[in-house]
Image (cartoon, rainbow, N blue to C red):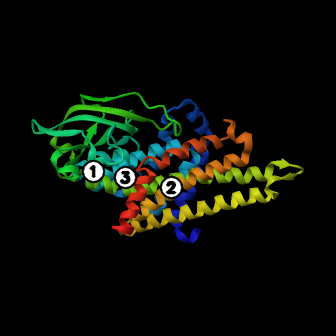
Amino acid sequence: MDFLYDDDERALRDAARAFAAKELAPRAAEADGNAAFPDGHMDALAAFGAMGLNLPEAFGGAGASAVGLALAVEALAAGCAATASTVTAHFLATDAILLAGDAAQKTRYLPAAAEGRALGAFALTEPGAGSDPADMTMRAEPSDGGYRLYGAKHFISNAGSADFLVVFAKTAPEAGHRGISAFIVARDTPGLSIGPAEATHGIRASHAFPVQFDCSVPAESRLGEEGSGFRTALMVLDRGRIETAALALGIAGAALEAARAWVEERVVSGQPIANFQGIRWMVADMSTELDAARLMTWRAARLRQQGERFTREAAMAKLYASEAAGRIADGALQIHGGYGYTTALPLERYVRDARILRIYEGTSEIQRNIIARFELD
């Protein structure tokens, strides 16, 4: 399918694959076993340019196309899904500043973020308002020429190591989603408190945290106009859903590659199990699903790249790729039999890592709601 992307995008994909194979894959099992945040990868990621893949060259980024970005994220996720998740969570924060920030905010935060000198977090989800951000209860009230933020966020990736958080709060509670505003909050702001990382089923080395706010921020920390935060969040999530789909492709591709190698090596009744029709059909179905998910992801990325609306296509790609990754990873484990269920091989990790993709950046059910609005309303 090389005809679907250009030479620059292919070169970025190949460079990301080589980087992931050298720097990420050899440490992925250990990071998962220790649930260790990928601090050890951060310098290498910065040197490679991974932290600024989503940003223009004007701010120190790679200036990658949307398709090139999807290809790179897939490659990183094939090496270590947890590390790729950490990187894409950082993209959510920097995308918000890129889309809604003023010149001073972009100059202050984006070059450092692109170079890997500052890590971002995107604080939208709340304990009682996950799938519908309009239900958030966090408030931002005018105070001393700025704002007082108070409330709680939950499952905020990167928060424990972030240098800054993009935070969403209601400045006009009576206005529903039109009363949501966004703010850039430094990690060391007095009154910002981050709890211990959640112990998770998968992507164990990509940490998510509860965050409590009772702090004051200056007016210049507001990102965009008052009441524009919900629109900013939706634009960021559209982009993030393509990246989540690409994460799914990376996990699924790694699982399928492992399955292909295994069926050629594993001998039963005197012959490789690749000769058995049942196995061949499993591999055929897995490969077909992976190709379909890739095509949907690249379509959404290409629409984004062309400046066209891509909300529907991003939701479709995220929905299909995340669910296909679960099936492909599970099928690859099944092909490995009892060996696949052990931690000696990465199959069980692929299964666990894939599971979160149907939940974050909007659950599968939310994606279906988004798609249905385009089809029926």
**Residue 238 seen in render:** yes
Label 2 sits on a secondary structure element that is helix
| Residue 354: mark | none
What residue occupies the far right of the structure in this picture? 270
Q: Position of residue 151 (x, y in %)?
A: 25, 34
Left-right relation of 369 to 175: right
Calculate the distance from the C-alpha at mark 3 to the C-alpha at mark 1: 11 Å
Q: The disc labelled 1 sits on which kind of residue?
A: Lys
Taking the spot 48% from the left edge, 35% from the top edge, the residue there is: 39
Q: The disc labelled 2 sits on which kind of residue?
A: Ala
Q: Is residue 223 above or below residue 146?
A: below
> Along the line of sight, which residue is nearer the eye, 301 or 211?
211
| Residue 106: mark | 1
**Residue 64 seen in render:** no
For the C terminus, the quadrant is bottom left
Instruction: Say which residue label 3 marks.
Output: 60
Q: Earlier in the sequence, mark 3 or mark 2?
A: 3
Calculate the distance from the C-alpha at mark 2 to the C-alpha at mark 1: 26 Å
> Along the line of sight, which residue is nearer the eye, 71 or 346?
346
Q: Earlier in the sequence, mark 3 or mark 1?
A: 3
Instruction: Say which residue label 2 marks.
Output: 246
Left-right relation of 23 to 333: left
> Along the line of sight, which residue is nearer the eye, 221 or 265?
265
Label 3 sits on a secondary structure element that is loop
Calculate the distance from the C-alpha at mark 3 to the C-alpha at mark 2: 23 Å
